[in-house]
Image (cartoon, rainbow, N blue to C red):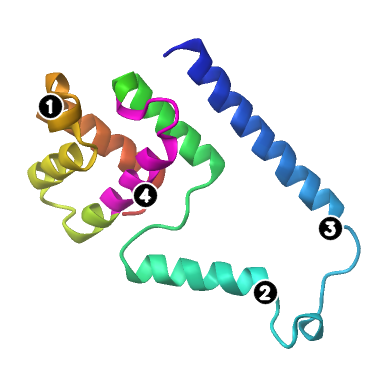
Amino acid sequence: MPRGTMRTRTTTAAALTVLALALTACGGGEEPTAEDHGGSRSAGTGAKDAEDKAREAAGLPPEPSTTARYRFLEALDAIDRRISEPGTDEQAVSRGLDQCGSIKASPDDRDRLIRQTLERFAIPTGLPDINTPKTGGKILAAVHEHLCPDF
């Protein structure tokens, strides 16, 4: 992996961690009551719950943590750096989450899942030199391990 990619991902992960800690520290004081939000426990929590329910109904896992995203992208880089080039991280994670839906729908049809994985990550057209069941299996394993281990 090029040093710049690793440094960018490491820096991004570190910045997100610092931001999360800062936001947690700023929140000091009392927890808001239901009355503070017009009767709802928390406006942010309600939206998150609705999003999680919609994702579950669509057969998708919850939104991955920053750590899970980072590990997934690192796993893709270990397979072939071209799968998730700098600037395409969100696209790679989105494709991985979509593949989680396929894993949940057909967990026992490994050959089909491998073909779908290769197609979903545009390997046949974008990287034909690595368009093999072995590559598809590695990407599928990375998706399963890091984005939807419970599927």
The foreground one among 63 and 142 is 63
* 151 magenta-colored: no
Residue that numbered label 4 is attached to: 148
Question: Mark 4 or mark 2: which comes first in sequence?
Answer: 2
Label 4, label 3: how far apart the Cα atoms are: 31 Å
The foreground one among 104 and 27 is 27
Pointers 4 and 2 in contact (C-beta within 8 Å):
no
Label 2, label 1: how far apart the Cα atoms are: 45 Å
On the image, the x and y values in percent for residue 23 come to 78, 50
> Viewed as shown, does residue 107 lie left or right of 93?
left
Question: Mark 4 or mark 3: which comes first in sequence?
Answer: 3
Q: Residues within 10 Å of mark 3 (few under 14, many from 20)?
A: few
Q: Is residue 144 above or below residue 50?
A: above
- Residue type indicated by callout 3: Gly
Q: Residue at x 29, y 20 (%)?
A: 80
- Residue type indicated by callout 4: Cys
The main secondary structure of the magenta stretch is helix
Question: Mark 2 or mark 1: which comes first in sequence?
Answer: 2
Question: Mark 3 or mark 2: which comes first in sequence?
Answer: 3
Residue 61 lies in quadrant: bottom left
Residue 16 lies in quadrant: top right
> Viewed as shown, does residue 109 lie left or right of 65?
left
Residue 110 lies in quadrant: top left
Q: Residue at x 30, y 52 (%)?
A: 98
Residue that numbered label 3 is attached to: 27
Residue that numbered label 1 is attached to: 131
Residue that numbered label 2 is attached to: 43
- Residue type indicated by callout 2: Ala
Image quarter (top left, top right, bottom left or bottom right) of the C terminus: bottom left
